[in-house]
Amino acid sequence: MKVLIIEDNEDLNNMFKVAFESKKYDVEVSLNGMDGVTKAGEFKPDVILLDIMMPQMNGYEVLSALKNNTSFPTKVVINSNLEQEGDKEKAVNLGADLYLKKSEYTPFEVVEEVEKLLAK
Amino acid sequence: MEPLIILSSINSVFAIAFGIFVFAKNPHKAVNRALALLAFFLGIWGIANFIPLDPKILELIAFGGMVFSIAANLHLTQTLIGDNKYKLIIGGYVFALFTLAISCLVFLKKDLLLASDILVFNHQACLLIGIILLIIPFFLLMNAAQNNVGLKKYQLKFIALEYSIALLVSTILLTLNFDVEKNIIANVSNSPHFVGALHLFVVFYLFAEYKFLRFKTIILGFLKRFIALSLAIIISLNFYYFINSTSFNIPEKLVIIFIMIIAVFAYSFILRFFKLQQWLNTISLENFRKTVIEFKNQNIFYASVEELQQDIQLNLCPRAEIEEAQVIVLDLDSKEAKFPQLEKYFTKNSNHLVTAEEEYLLNSKHIECPYFTELKSLGDVCFPLFQHTNELIGFFIIRKSVGSDIYIAEELQLLKEAVHYIALSLMGILYTEKLRQQSGKLREDYEKLKTLDSAKDAFIANVSHELRTPATAIKGYSSMLVAPTFGELSEKQKDFASKIEKNTNWLLTLLNDILEITKLENKQIKFKFTKIEVRKLLEEVTEKWKKPCEKKGLKFKLRLDFKDPTLALQTDSEYLAEVLDRLLTNACKFTEKGEILISAKLEGEFLKIAVSDTGVGISTNKLTKVWDRFFQSADFLEKSDTGAGLGLAIVKKLVENLDGNISVSSELGKGSVFTLLIPF
């Protein structure tokens, strides 16, 4: 299984990378949205773990860029601390498959949730 | 003696007595003065015609009339100038009686020395005394006019003119009535005649000297008084010829006398002819009292001084013969600097008012106050307005209607009551204004604080949000540290790592709670009301909490006391679930043994959900405080390892937003019950 982590905070990015690798995932990371979109095209991951608040291109923009391609099969899991009213709704409307609040899950729990999603 | 003569004599005596009585009671009132004069005419007439007295006595009476006239003028002058009215009234009459006594003495002496040179001398003496006595009050009047006692000069002149005419007419009539052949009387009767003419001369001199005449007022006043006096003379003449006539018998004459008395009252009507409407309202003191009482019983709340003034102009002025009334508000802050003497004056005489004559007194003490220049004529009054602390807050100035009379003591007393009402109203206005200013400032402060508060909230929200990223990293890494995936740690290290994880969780909960309550208080959360099945919601909650509770050794029960399995609520399921989660978090945290129970049943238009535990409980005195932000019961703290005291504050806010209600009952050591009421 291939996972692409798009997260601007290096430590968090690395944390999720380690967690997914420990579960035998093929992991690619990206530190900003722009790079993330490019890597998604090249790497063709099964799932993307996507942050929202990022410089240059935020998570929503990344999401709509990816989902514009109707044949895009990759699942997208939003992993963010944003909880403004309507954030979750907005993400789901743009085609996100799962919305996780970053602070509420440990990395392994995130992996578990992703696995649950992929099993569907 | 003929009965007709006796009757007429009695009438005459009564008429004179009536005249003196009416005049003495209120010489300020034109109606009183006129009635007194009329009665006096009638009296002299009656005596002169019906009693075959010695001509000397008749002459004495004529002198008496003159003396009366002098006394009236003197009295009036002194009343206007003096400060103690009663003392001067008595003084006036003493003076009049003294004059009378001198006249009598002269006549008695004259009788003994009839047709001698001494007689001529005495006649001249009489004349001289008469002139002196008449001139004295006129000097007083002139003096008063020059010192500007508050009397308009034309008013002085009209008072003088009125008495001059009266005196002149009485002199002429008396002269006509005496037998010219009896030369003593004719000579003596020339003296009042002469005095009357002199009297008139003085009046016209004053009249011509005055530069600022108000013609309308003068003509009106003159006409009014002229008509009144003419009527009196006509009535007198008619009476004279009528009594002398042989065409009527006595009963007929009595009926006609009665009619004449009515005519006397008709005089009042004519006197008031030009102010008929006002007269209808002010004819009696009783009406005046009614007007004042009605006015002060209004108990209106006035929003401004203008409104108060308008009400006075509308409801008090027309019926109290006031042409113009003015409420003047002192600038309370600078008053002391402006009128120190004035303030002292009024503090000493707190129940006082300033009339025209007192204004003169104040002026002579060099108390300069622009408001007193408002007093333009006799009868105008300046009332001080005091607030409850006896502090001067303003003046109430009354300008009398043109042609009306000055107030009598009773009327002034009544007016004082109206003024008291005005002072109270003014006080209300001033206080309201002050309050409005203060509340405006308070509102400003409040808005400022609100802005600061929301800035603070925004700051807290931002900081909390920013803190979450590093906290999430600590939480993630420490959780991975504990997991065996990346190699085993020693027991100690594991313990430390799990403590890091636990505290990070606490920190995150705290940050999340702060963010949530901030949003709730700033109404940034939108609630979405949808239909949800109660049973499903509660079963989901039970499923989530059953395990962790049982792990702790607690029983967890759900009891549904309603029959309809599809019973649904119109509410926000996400936030209702959060409320239950938060309540159950507390229940689970603070209960060591026993059970946790969720029960639900219908209660009117509400669904009642109760979360009860058998935990530590909350002491009674702290029960009301559990909803406060950052409140932590000490009993809680002992058992608590995590928590910021925001949970229940959030619960309360959420329930309010769901249009519900939450209450708590508890007993220390036995457990707590949180009861939710959610509307359908």
Image: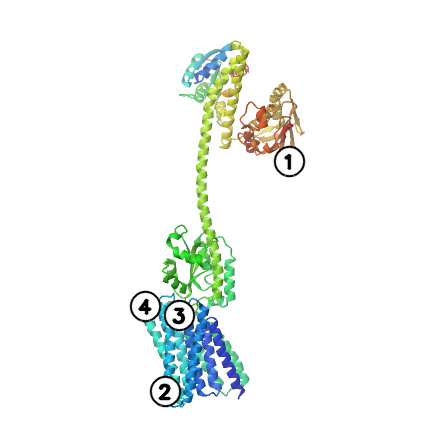
Q: Are marks 4 and 1 in contact (CB under 8 Å)?
A: no
Disc number lying in front (4 or 1): 4
Q: Residues within 10 Å of mark 2 (few under 14, many from 20)?
A: some
User: Do the residues at discs 1 and 2 belong to one chain?
Assistant: yes
Could you say whether the residue bearing mark 3 is in a helix, strand or loop? helix
Say which chain tag 3 marks. Answer: B
Mark 2 is on which residue type?
Val
Counting residues from the start of the chain, the first of labels 1 and 3 encountered is 3
Q: Looking at the image, is B616 positioned above or below residue B199? A: above
Q: Earlier in the sequence, mark 1 or mark 2?
A: 2
| Left or right of residue B66, residue B595 in this image | right
What is the crowding at mark 1: few (fewer than 14 residues within 10 Å), some, or many (at least 20)? few
Report x, y in % for residue B368: 36, 58
Type of amino acid at the residue the image marks with label 4:
Lys
Q: Which residue is mark 4?
A: B211
Q: Quadrant of residue B345?
A: bottom left
Indicate which disc, 2 or 4, sits on the residue closer to the N terminus.
2
How far apart, in angstroms, are the residues tagged by discs 1 and 3? 83 Å
Residue in the foreground of this view, choosing between B676 and B61: B61
Quote the CA–CA distance across marks 2 and 4. Answer: 43 Å
**Residue B656 visible here:** yes
Q: Position of residue B311 (x, y in %)?
A: 46, 57
